[in-house]
Amino acid sequence: MQFNSFTEVLAMGGYGAYVWSSVAIVFAVLLMLIVHSCTAKNRTLRLLRIEQERADKISQAKVANAQALFDKK
Amino acid sequence: MWKWLHPYAKAETAYNLCYRLLPYFSWLAAITLIAGSIWGLLYAPADYQQGDSFRIIYFHVPTAIWSMGAYTSMAICGMVGIVWQIKNAELAVYAIAPVGAAFTFLALVTGAVWGKPMWGAWWVWDARLTSELILLFLYLGVIALYNSFEDKRTAARAASILAIVGVVNVPIIHYSVEWWNTLHQGASITKFDKPSISPDMLWPLLLNIAGFLFILAAITCLRLANQILINDARRPWVKALVEQSSTEATSLVKGK
């Protein structure tokens, strides 16, 4: 290891703020990208499920409507 | 000879392939990135001129390389989509774009954070930096263009054309340090020459370059699978998936 103590690791020869802030932003952005991509499938499935339920309801209502009209006659 | 490729034009096969490849890419990315980052940050020797600030290279160079690599592959996908009308290729354009944009952003930010202590400025309007900034705008343009059409076929075609036209920027970025006088240093690794950096510093860099490639591949798999799902929403195989997810959701509720 190039460093003798943890404080030296943090200091990075005086460039600690620059080195560690860039490390932090790289992993923060990567993490955001990973989380957003991993949850994408569930979001899509939920959206499609809602759409499907809505379509089912509409078709059920249509059938009920037709039935009501038929009964009246 | 190329017949084995044909089944992958089918959406469901491509979707399954994405999820089959995903674990390999994810594990390779995790291993190489963790090893490369720790090696580079703690064990590589300090630079004789730049001291420890040079360690930013382990994030700056991989993101910069793959910001261009992702753009090129996005443009190739766009080309394939337009020429051979392969829908999965069009979807891949939109799947790669956010990853490429994130990498470009990271290359610019880490470059600025490195530039401040070394050059004394966060930003200079230099050829390398400006052309990389244009790359970010091209990525954002592709994403915005794709989202601005209701009809996704038209959207994909427009975004693909922008991606193809924008590829002219990639060699400009690459050669900018040779064509113009610039503050940015020249290449540390070239394909044909011996690298101008010591092996102790080079190995962790190569590890991280591999790591960012694998994470690019992994995230692209995830996003492409999702795009295929959205695009095929009316197809029976997607409906079956939706059905399955809704029974899982209700069984979860009932389980409580």
Image: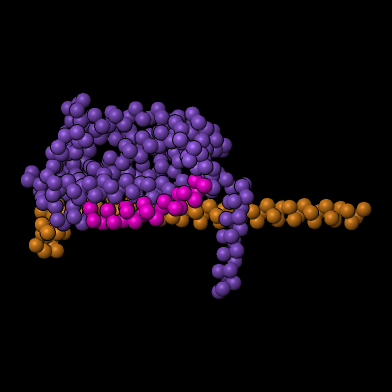
B229 lies above or below B172: below
Image quarter for residue B254? bottom right
In which quadrant of the rendered image does the C terminus of chain B lie?
bottom right
The image shows residue B231 at horizontal and vertical percentages of 55, 44
| Chain coloured purple | B
Residue B44 visible to the viewer: yes
In this rendering, the answer to whether B183 lies above or below B105 is above
Is residue B16 one of those drawn in magenta?
Answer: yes
Residue drawn where x is 29% and y is 56% of the image: B31
How far across and how far down the image is residue B25, in percent?
Answer: 36, 52
Residue at 35% x, 39% y: name it. B70
Left of A57 or right of it: where is B76? left
Q: Hey, which residue is sitting farthest top in the picture?
A: B179
User: Which color scheme does this rendered protein use?
Assistant: by chain
Front residue (pair B82, B145): B82
Identify the colour of chain A in the image: orange
In this rendering, is residue B146 above or below B237? above
Which residue is depicted at the point 25% across and 49% down?
A: B208
The image quarter in which residue B248 lies: bottom right
Q: Is residue B195 left or right of residue B59?
A: left
Determine the main secondary structure of the stretch shown in magenta.
Answer: helix
Q: Residue furthest front?
A: B1
* Residue B14 magenta: yes
Is B2 displayed left or right of B134 in the figure?
A: right
Return the residue nearer the eye: A32 or B46.
B46
Give the residues drawn in magenta, as a range. B13-36
Residue B156 image point, x, y percent: 50, 35
Q: Is residue A32 visible?
A: no
Where B141 sits versus B204, above or below? above
Find residue A41 and report its horizontal and vertical position in percent. Answer: 49, 54
Which residue occupies 33% across, 38% down?
Answer: B69
